[in-house]
Image (cartoon, coloured by chain):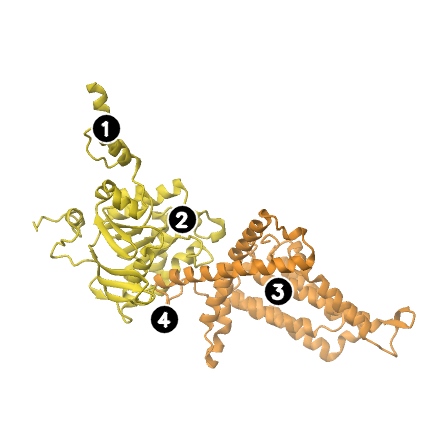
Chain colours: A yellow, B orange
Amino acid sequence: MKQRDLKGPHGTTNVVEETVRNPNVMPSPYSPTIELVGVSYGYGKDLPVIDDITLSIPQGQWVTLVGANGCGKSTLVKLMNALLPKGEGSIKVKGLELQSDTIGKIRQTIGMVFQNPDNQFIGATVEEDIVFGLEGQCLSIEVMEERVKSYAARLGITDLLYKHPSELSGGQKQRVAIASILSMEPEVVIFDEASSMLDEKTRNELLNILSDMHKSGRYTIISITHDAQEIAASERVLVLHEGKLIADRTPTELFQDEKILEMSHVIAPFAFQLTRELHRYGLDISIPNCEKELMEALWPLHLRK
Amino acid sequence: MSEKLLIGRTIDTGSWVHSIDPRAKMIAMMLYVVIIILSNTWLEMACVVVFSLAIIALTRIHIKYFIRAAKPLWVLMLFIFIVQCIKVVDKNGAILLSIGSWNLYVEGFKLGLFSVLRMVFLVSFTAILTFTTTPGRLNQGLEGVLKPLKVIRVSPDRFTLMVSIALRFIPSILEEAQIILKAQASRGADVRELPWKEKGKMLVSLLVPVTVGAFRRAEDLVHSMESRGFRMGEPRTKYHSLVWRSRDTIFIGFFIIMLIAMVWMSGYGTGELWTL
C-alpha cells in the first residue's frame, strides 16, 4: 500500500481514506483499535447469535453496524466491552486481548451509549451522572470538576447540571449520557441504537454530535442504527445477517446494492432512491452523497432541454 | 401519583438548616427520637413543641408541608388514640366521660393524646431531613453514619448504592405503572370503576408487567454501570465529599441541650406540677 504523508496528530484523515477504499488493508504503523478474529457467541451450538465474525476497525474510523432486529448487532458490541460472557474467538482492543484481567482496562477504552436514555441514567442529577464514571477512574476532585465543566459545555447541558432526570427530555437525557461517556475520555465510543427513541430534530442533533466527534479525530465510533442519514454520514458500514457479517463496504456502495439493503432492512436515503429511479429512465447521473448534490446534478439537465 | 409523594422530596429554601451536613441532621434526628420518647408530662411536651416549631421555622419551609407529611398516618393515629382510651383502666383516677358501664379515664385520654402528639411530631419533624437534603447528599450522609458497620463487615457503600438506585428508580417505576394502568383502562378495564375484589385482581395483573419492566431496567442499568467501569468493591474517589463544620456541631448542640433538659426535667420531677 502506498505510504502517504500524514496530517494531524493521529494521521486520521489518511488512515480513514485508505480504509474506506479497502477496509481490510491497514496502514502498517497503526495497529487496529478493535480486532475480532473468529468471534462466535450463542446459546448452544445450534443457536449462534454471532457466527464466526472477523473484522478490524482502525483508529478514528466511523463505522455503522446495520441489520434486521435480532441479527446480533447489540450482542456483538456488548461482546467487545465484555458486557456478555466471552464466547469463542479473540477480541483485541488497542492490542489488548479481552480476558478477565483486562476487562477493566478495556472498559476504560470503550464507552457505550445505549438505546433507552432513562435506563442508563445512574445519578440523581445530571452532574452526579457524569461524575459516576469519573469516580470509578479514581480521578482527583479538580480533574473531575474540570471535566464536568468542559464536557457539559461541549454538549450544551451546563444549565441542566443540577436537574433530576425526570425534568429532562429524551434528547437532553441522551446528551447527558454522551457527556457522561465522553468525560471518561474513551478512545472508542459505541452507540447502541442511541437515536432510535428520539424525534427527528433530536436525531439530527445527535448526528451533528457524532460528526463533530468524528472530525475531532479522537474517537473511533461504532454506531448501531437504522437511520439512513446516519449511515450515509459514516465511513464504513458493516451488515449483519443472522449473526454473520455479510457485507463490509462504504455507505454509497451499500445504498446501491438492493439485495443487501433488503437483507439489512435499511431504506436508502431519498437522493439514492431517486437516482436509482432516474437510472432506470436512462438518465446518467453520478451517485450523490446528499440531496443537495443531486439537485446540483439535476438542474443543468433542465437547462440543456 | 408522584404529586402526592412527599417522602424524599427536597424543598429548597436555601436556609441555614439546608446547609447542615446530612450526617449531623441524621444524628440530630436520632436524638430527637429519644427526646420525644422522654417527654411524658405536659411541660415536657410543651418544650418539645416549642423546640420543634423553632427548628421548623429555621428551615423557612411553610408549615403546611410538615402537616401534610403526617397526614397519611391519620388512620393509624386515630387507632392508637382509641386503643389507648379504651385500654387504660385507672380505678383510682378521674373519669372524664362515662358511657354506660364504660368509663373514659383522664389517664387514658392523656396517654392517647400523648401518643398521637408524639407520632405527629416524630413524622413531621423528621421530614426536615428529606425536605432540606437532596437524595444524593442524604445518601452520602447515610454512608457516613453507617461507617461503623464496617467493623462487622457490612459494607456501607453497597447499602447506599442500593438506596440511591432505589430512590432514583422509584419515580420511573411508578410512572411505568401509571402507563400500564392507562393502557389497561384504554382497553376497557378501568381500575377506578371496578369493585374492590376486582381491583385486587387487576393489581395482580399490573404487578407482572411492572416487575418485568423493573428487571429490564435493572439489566440496562447494570450494562450502563459496567460500561462506565463500575466494579463492586473497587476503589473510587468521591466528587462531593462531606466536610464537618462548626455549624454542624452547633446544630447537634441544640438537640443535646434539649435532651439534657428532658433528662433533667424527668429526673427532678419538675414536670410533676404540670401533670394532669
| Residue projecting furthest to the front | A46
Could you tell me how far apart the alpha carbons at marks 3 and 2 are, in whole angstroms?
34 Å
Residue type at numbered disc 4:
Glu
Could you say which disc has been placed on residue B234 in the image?
4
Whichever of labels 2 and 1 marks the residue nearer the N terminus, that label is 2
Q: Give the label, 4 or 2, closer to the camera.
A: 4
The lab-note entry on whether marks 3 and 4 share a chain reads: yes
Could you tell me how far apart the alpha carbons at marks 3 and 4 are, in whole angstroms?
34 Å
| Residue holding disc 2 | A158
Q: Give the label, 1 or 3, closer to the camera.
A: 1
Q: Residue sitting at 31 percent across and 64 percent down?
A: A46
Left or right: residue A159 compared with residue B24: left
| Residue holding disc 3 | B126
Could you tell me how far apart the alpha carbons at marks 4 and 2 are, in whole angstroms?
30 Å
Residue type at numbered disc 2:
Thr
Q: Is residue A277 visible?
A: yes
SS label for mark 3: helix
| Residue holding disc 1 | A281
Seen from the viewer's position, the closer of residues A23 and A8 is A23
Q: Residue sitting at 53 percent across and 66 percent down?
A: B248
Left or right: residue A144 compared with residue B131: left
Q: Give the label, 1 or 4, closer to the camera.
A: 1
Binning the other alpha carbons within 10 Å of mark 3 as few (below 14), some (14 to 19) or many (20 upward) gives many
